Amino acid sequence: MSGEWDLKILCMGAGYVGGPTMAVIAKQCPKIRVVVGDISQKQIDAWNTDDLPIYEPGLLEVVQECRHRNLFFSTDLDKEIDEADVIFISVNTPTKTKGIGAGAAANIKNCELCARHIAKIAKQSKIVVEKSTVPVRTAEAISRILRANEKGFEFQVLSNPEFLAEGTAIKDLMNPDRVLIGGPQTTEGLKAIETLVSVYANWVPLEQILTTNLWSSELSKLVANAFLAQRVSSINSISALCEATGADVNEISRAVGMDDRIGKRFLQPSVGFGGSCFQKDILNLVYLCETYGLQACADYWRQVIQMNDFQKKRFSEGIVASMFNTVTGKKIAILGYAFKKDTGDVRETPSMFVVRDLLQENAKIHVYDPQVTRGDMWLEMDYTCGVNHDNTPGLDEAVTTSTDAYSACDGAHAVCILTEWDEFKTLDYKKIYDSMAKPAFLFDGRLLLDHKELRKIGFEVHAIGKPDPIKFPGSTI
């Protein structure tokens, strides 16, 4: 901690977590030098332009304010490791696809590689901070690697999990519910914790900065996401019951949410949850429970994933069943491919699974999303679903990416709302209806639209958790 800066921070990893987090730290702490480092030159080059590699409302403005002032992006990791006082590790920890724990355990290879590189390059002691979502006791593994540096340096390893939500990340970082910092309960460990507390204290009230031991911090992140996903799967299970009985899931959500013991948040039914965290963290929790012999606990949390899979499949099957049990050769417009609005992230997006199912039914699919590129769509579909140009002949002909919603819907037999983008609320649905094949079907997987008005236009509307007016003619719609 010398020279013109109070502190020098390096973040290893320039992705969805590292980039926005470091940008906000730089904005709120002008006396701290913040570097985002990555081995990908393409990624770093994008961060140094106004065409950022990720989309997040408000992010560009923060980066523009701080870039080249106290926020820098670099591939020179050796130099930045040497100069940094605090090093964040914010790299991808995907679910293992093979080997021990395949399909559940997190692969922490990237975290280990970062730790080994720090141990190799560092010329003095550092504070190393886990920012990636990791299994409990990963910090112990990182500490062992760092202690084996043969240079006599002592590294303090902290856990500082992120709780931001994509689409509202900048708002979440600027006004967090809490900041959680876990570390060794030793003299040096507590001193390291205080160093990190002092960074966040530049804008976060001290009463909202929680300090714990390492293991509580690591587990808290998994549990928080598991609880949120559990709520989504819970209301989605009720949406299926509502469709069967004629109840309205929105009315159920409102009635249940008014109980202050339950609260209103995360009671919005949908085609299913997606994103990089929920499924991965629950599967990680399942694997931990199984590892420690807690099979009943593992089975409990696995059911959250099974319900999410059921909801996605149920939506796809409902499309086919409603359209006379065949969509072969029919044009289906998919409005929204990102897993939620205000992000371009397609990891585990429900749209991908619906598209996969419709492809298997030989539908002609036209996708429009304001932030998702065709390349990103194929990359994730190949990685997660195994659908690619090698094993799916005619894939490019079967799936068209449209530049606007109207061209996607032109001539379509059905429109599917799969991401809750605000622009979809204000489309001219009379214009869309007039351009479609008849009968014109609309499947609302986000409960985004006014179904009564759509039916007046002439659409046959099917919506998650809503009573079918043909099956339940007396229901409120």
Image (cartoon, rainbow, N blue to C red):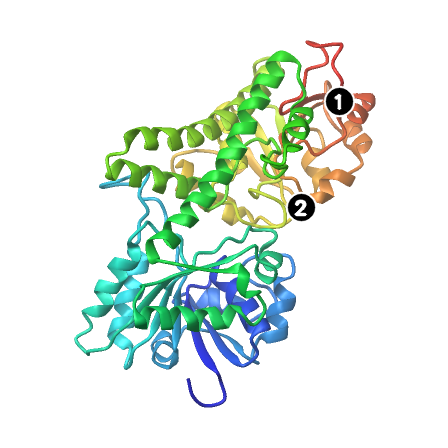
Give coordinates of residue 323: x percent, y percent: 62, 17
Q: Residues within 10 Å of mark 2 (few under 14, many from 20)?
A: few
Three-letter code for the amino acid on which mark 2 is drawn: Thr
Q: Is residue 214 left or right of residue 194?
A: left
| Residue hosting label 2 | 403
Q: At 52% across and 24% down in the image, what residue appears?
A: 362
| Residue hosting label 1 | 459
Q: Is residue 10 visible?
A: no
Q: At 50% across and 53% down in the image, what residue appears?
A: 163
Q: Quadrant of the C terminus?
A: top right
Question: In terms of secondary structure, where does tag 1 sit?
Answer: loop
In which quadrant of the rendered view does residue 281 lie?
Answer: top left
Q: Quadrant of the N terminus?
A: bottom left
Give coordinates of residue 178: x percent, y percent: 53, 56
Closest to the observer, 311 or 237: 237
CA gap between label 2 and label 1 equals 23 Å
Closest to the observer, 15 or 7: 7
Closest to the observer, 107 or 196: 196
Three-letter code for the amino acid on which mark 1 is drawn: Phe
Front label number (2 vs 1): 1
Q: Is residue 165 left or right of residue 287?
A: right
Q: Is residue 142 above or below residue 6?
A: above
Residue lying at the far bottom in this picture: please name it: 3
